[in-house]
Amino acid sequence: MSGVMKMTNEEVVTMTSLEVIELINNFRKEEGNATLKRHDVLLRDIRNEIETLKTLGISNAHNFVEVTYKDLKGEERPCYKMNKAGIMQMLNKESALVRYKTQQYIEALENKLKQPTKPLSAMELLKLQYQVIEEQDQKIEEVREDLNAFKEDIPLFPYECEEITKTVKKIGTLVLGGYGSKAYKNKSLRAKVYSDIHRQLKREFDVNSFKVIKRKHLKLALDIVENYSLTVALNEEVELMNSQVAFA
């Protein structure tokens, strides 16, 4: 973890928005989510949250405090310092696992920092952070395993549906004779072929839409599409269309 947790004078654990972003992205990776959240997006979300609360007459001065940091070029950039309430407030759109791990991480640091100890050196604080992470990793290993099993048993993610759609178009184009073929250029026939590939997927998995195929069957679904063959009727129609000679 690049940042360090700090204790304010009021003994409230705080983190900067940079540190929160790093936590979010690390925990996203752990659960298999390759989408990284950008710091500028978090800043936008925090400002929107502050403005929304202002319109409702709610003050959040202690949850979000605007500060600055220096980037790699030495230039000052805006960021926010947040207490635990502010951090969890900004995680409402994250997954259950990300929220859980972040909360456990903060609570563990709170417990460590509440213990009467001499001031920690930078190296000791760094070791403490890694120790906290390791402890929390051990505690939620079973939760992570259950989550992974659950994720495999739920319908395809949007990007996985898009992967199937692209494969359907690729194979459909191939069996039609390629982009330059008369069969491909015939929108009605092209739609028939694409629809037939989708129907085969629905038959194989007994579903009304390929989008509800379980994630654990993604590779099998792609293999089915890759090995698709035209029906006899469609094959004859494609061959007839491609064999037609254009007359001037």
Image: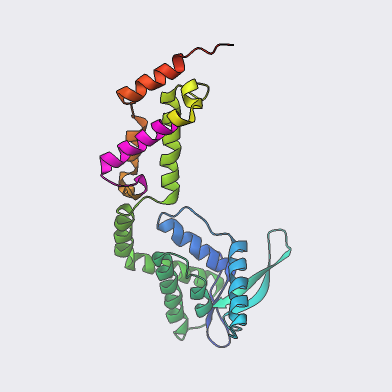
Residue 105 painted magenta = no
Q: Is residue 115 above or below residue 70?
A: below
Question: What is the quadrant of residue 239 in the picture?
Answer: top left
Q: Quadrant of the C terminus?
A: top right
Q: Residue furthest front?
A: 248
201 versus 84 height, above or below: above
From the viewer's side, name the closer residue of 135 and 158: 158
* Relative height, residue 245 to residue 106 (above, below): above
Q: Is residue 245 left or right of residue 224?
A: right
The question of residue 197 being in magenta is answered with yes
Range of the magenta residues?
Answer: 190-211
User: Outermost residue toward the right?
Assistant: 75
Residue at x-position 46% and y-position 80% = 110
Q: Residue 201 at x, y = what percent?
A: 32, 39
Q: Most prominent secondary structure in the magenta stretch?
A: helix
Seen as rendered, the residue at the extreme bottom is: 10
Depth check: give the residue in front, 138 or 19. Answer: 19
Residue closest to the eye, 222 or 81: 222
* Residue at screen point 46% across, 86% down: 116
Horizontal relation, residue 113 to residue 226: left or right: right
> Is residue 81 something that shows in the picture?
yes
At 45% across and 70% down in the image, what residue appears? 102
- Res. 220 visible in picture: no
Q: Residue at x 29, y 56 (%)?
A: 149
